[in-house]
Image (cartoon, rainbow, N blue to C red):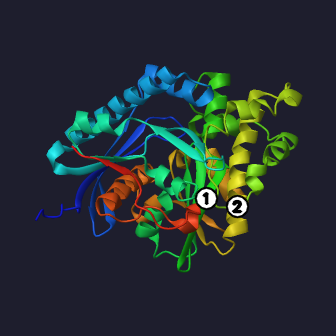
């Protein structure tokens, strides 16, 4: 008889989201379904690999491009994991598993058939690190009729579920909310977070992002353009729902700009910031009217202008980072994928059907042994 593996212990979570700002690495100790951050690292994408990822997302790539970039991403995920281990003074043998979200290239849960694709070959990660790797978390939920995302709400409930009437807001490239209500959890992608802001800033100012939202703060919101953007049917669609940067991207924006050619770039930046803030807060007020506080995580927490706009829209609802309850806003999502790997290694479900719309609870992610 083979002993069951010990599944409490150290895990690595890898998250590279739609904002494309690098690979978040979270080294966590997970015991009894609770995660504690031990070490963390932001690992930048090499310029060549980043360019290839952007091309995959924004165009119709060749099969060779897709497969090559899949392997390049895997190498960087492995490098990022090993760098975090070295920084922590640990070895591969100290880690039970890596949970890798992968880089989303396509996400189309409403298609027939539905599909999703996150690249970063897990077999290669496992081989290069000699650490068991868990990946492809979204596919099983989609196969079960769900959206495949967001998956972090299950982790939010595990870590913050005793805190009622609160919303956890993750602002990555795409924004999503987790509503922690009385004995229930809901959540979904609200729409744009940072990605449109970053893309516009890059195209107009050759800067990867608008530091502190300074450019947006210097501009004026164009209400006509804002209303046109908010008229997109994604915003009024009921949940469960999820989206990605293959939908909300620079090409989506440019389709709305022909009648606004004389607008200063800063005004468009301001309007995009208002779009993110307005679309997020509208969904919170509509679906969680009793919310007492919003806990923000993700890179958007550092956009001072965006957070100010959120607070203005939310009125009496307080806005804090998740750091208020001991969870760094910078590492929440990477920690979630360490935790999801833990769940998979335990043979436990990683999805919440009430969030994704799946036909039931499912063990999410494939296991690639060391």
Tell me if label 1 and label 2 are in contact, CB under 8 Å: yes
Relative to 255, residue 154 above or below: below
Relative to 241, residue 216 above or below: above
Q: Residues within 10 Å of mark 1 (few under 14, many from 20)?
A: many
Q: Position of residue 106 (x, y in %)?
A: 57, 38
The residue tagged 1 is: 188
| Marked residue nearer the N-terminal end (1 or 2) | 1
Q: Is residue 149 visible?
A: no
Left or right of 194 on screen, residue 67: left
Relative to 50, residue 146 above or below: below
Nearest-to-viewer mark from 1 and 2 = 1
Q: What secondary structure is found at the residue carrying circle 1?
A: strand
Q: Position of residue 101 (x, y in %)?
A: 42, 45
Q: Image point 73% across, 46% down: which residue?
A: 275
Q: What secondary structure is found at the residue carrying circle 2?
A: helix
Please, which residue is most extreme toward the left here?
A: 1
| CA gap, disc 1 and disc 2 | 10 Å
Left or right of 119 on screen, residue 244: right
């Amino acid at each position: 008889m083979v002993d069951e593996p010990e599944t409490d212990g150290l895990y690595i979570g890898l998250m590279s989201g739609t904002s494309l700002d690098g690979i978040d690495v979270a080294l966590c100790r997970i015991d009894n379904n609770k995660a504690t951050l031990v070490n963390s690292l932001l690992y930048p994408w090499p310029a060549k690999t980043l360019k290839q990822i952007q091309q995959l997302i924004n165009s119709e790539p060749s099969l060779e491009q897709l497969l090559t970039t899949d392997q390049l991403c895997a190498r960087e995920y492995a490098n990022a994991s090993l760098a975090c281990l070295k920084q922590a003074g640990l070895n591969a043998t100290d880690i039970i598993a890596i949970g890798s979200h992968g880089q989303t290239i396509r996400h189309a849960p409403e298609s027939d058939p539905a599909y999703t694709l996150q690249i970063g070959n897990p077999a290669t990660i496992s081989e290069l690190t000699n650490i068991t790797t868990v990946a492809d978390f979204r596919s099983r939920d989609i196969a079960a009729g769900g959206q495949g995302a967001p998956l972090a709400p299950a982790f939010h409930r595990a870590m913050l579920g005793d805190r009622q009437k609160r919303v956890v807001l993750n602002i990555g490239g795409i924004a999503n909310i987790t509503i922690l209500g009385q004995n229930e959890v809901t959540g979904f992608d609200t729409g744009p977070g940072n990605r449109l802001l970053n893309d516009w800033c890059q195209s107009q100012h050759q800067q990867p992002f608008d530091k502190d939202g300074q450019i947006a703060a210097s501009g004026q919101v164009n209400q006509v353009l804002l209303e046109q953007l908010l008229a997109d049917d994604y915003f009024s669609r009921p949940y469960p729902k999820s989206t990605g940067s293959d939908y909300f991207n620079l090409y989506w924006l440019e389709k709305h700009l022909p009648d606004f050619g004389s607008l200063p770039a800063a005004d468009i930046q301001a309007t995009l910031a208002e779009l993110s803030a307005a679309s997020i807060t509208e969904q919170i007020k509509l679906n969680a009217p009793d919310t007492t506080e919003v806990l923000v995580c993700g890179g958007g927490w550092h956009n001072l202008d965006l957070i100010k706009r959120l607070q203005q829209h939310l009125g009496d609802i307080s806005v804090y980072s998740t750091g208020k309850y001991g969870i760094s806003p910078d590492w929440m999502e990477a920690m979630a994928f360490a935790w999801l790997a833990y769940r998979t290694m335990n043979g436990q479900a990683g999805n919440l059907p009430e969030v994704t719309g799946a036909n039931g609870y499912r063990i999410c992610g494939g296991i690639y042994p060391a």
